[in-house]
Image (cartoon, rainbow, N blue to C red):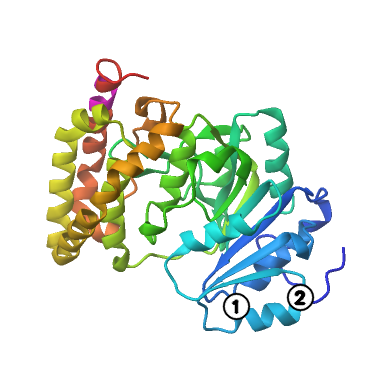
Amino acid sequence: MNVRGGPAELTSSSAGLHSDATPFPADVDVAIVSHNGRETLPATLASLTGAGCPQHQIIVVDVASTDGTLPWLEKDWPEVHRIRLNENLGPSPGRNAGMAAAGRRYVFLMDADVTVAPNTIAMLRASFEADPTIAIGSPVVVHATRPDTIQYAGTCLHFICEAVNPWLDRPLRDRGVEAQDIGVASTCALLIDRAKLQAIGTFDERYFIGKEDGDFTHRAKLAGFKIWEIPQCLAYHRSRPRGSWLFYFQIRNRWHFMLKAYEVRTLLFILPVLAIHETLQAIVLVGKGHGRTYLKAVAGLIRMLPDLPADRAAIKRTRRLHDASVLCTGPLVAREDVAGGVLLKAKAAYESFLSGYWWLLTRTVLPR
């Protein structure tokens, strides 16, 4: 198809694939969240047109950009629906605005630094027809600069509320071809059934960044829905290292996530492990010069506590599964620049201890 004003060049990871694309689903809108994404949006939009997506099914939510994104879109992509947020409060307000603006049942959320393989969205959409319990479709996310290497696949939520990403930086070919129901998913690229997930609410805009995608997708799991990952569906992400400024949000949001979403019984029985984990985390952060950040995060959590009863009540209304059915154990994702060599060497033993503890809990005191 010819799209007026659309850029012709794709990223190297997705170029040349568009000729085999299947028809784009008529009931899917695409919502792209962009903050100063003028440099990456041409490739993102080109990958969508390569997949057969009409401009009028694309929404770009511009989050307080200062790089001329909106004038460029108006000139080169005039049929793309544009939304402007005047303040940068993280990606969640943009995702919520994109979902609200979508007029179709399904919305494919993606970040402005992501491109998709041509058949990705169509294949994800088709999977919903085969299984009514699927509410979220997830591609395998690979590094755009290393498209044969996985960034996110098979992800789940560790019971101490940390990420388990077993395929990180492993070859894509090793993932195999079998689709699977995963535990949580990165929101850099996700297909969402808005009708099924209406009851669980939107992304928590208080989080700014860090755990916001895990919180949303975990609530979908608690409600009894599947997050269906198809390895033939690929999203290419311009991944980059994250700075230490994120520590505040990661610490605060992780604790709020657990207090909001975990059953009381779960919290009580994992308390001994949490005491160990938090002590270790605090020691490491203080040792790396981030002690003040840790204290600020605790203060930030305290300010969020008054709303906790309402938060827990909202999850209770949609909960269909116990924590033990959706939480997991496995290798934790640890930043080498923070953990350091000594702790990384002890990481496997610590993970084994956590796995054994969870195994005991789920076979004795925690219902599945």
Q: Amino acid at mark 1?
A: Arg
Whole-angstrom CA distance, mark 1 to mark 2, is: 15 Å
Asked which secondary structure carries label 2, the reply is loop
- Residue on which the image places disc 2: 78
Pick the front one: 315 or 296: 315
Asked if labels 2 and 1 touch by Cβ distance under 8 angstroms, the answer is: no
Q: Position of residue 346 (x, y in %)?
A: 20, 43
**Which image quarter: residue 41?**
bottom right
Residue 357 in magenta?
A: yes
Secondary structure character of the magenta stretch overall = helix
Among numbered discs 1 and 2, the one appearing first in the sequence:
1
Residue 301 in magenta?
A: no
- Residue on which the image places disc 1: 38
Q: Position of residue 15 (x, y in %)?
A: 73, 63
Q: Magenta stretch?
A: 356-360
Left or right relative to 136: residue 151: left
Left or right relative to 180: residue 250: left
- Residue at image position (59%, 37%) is 196
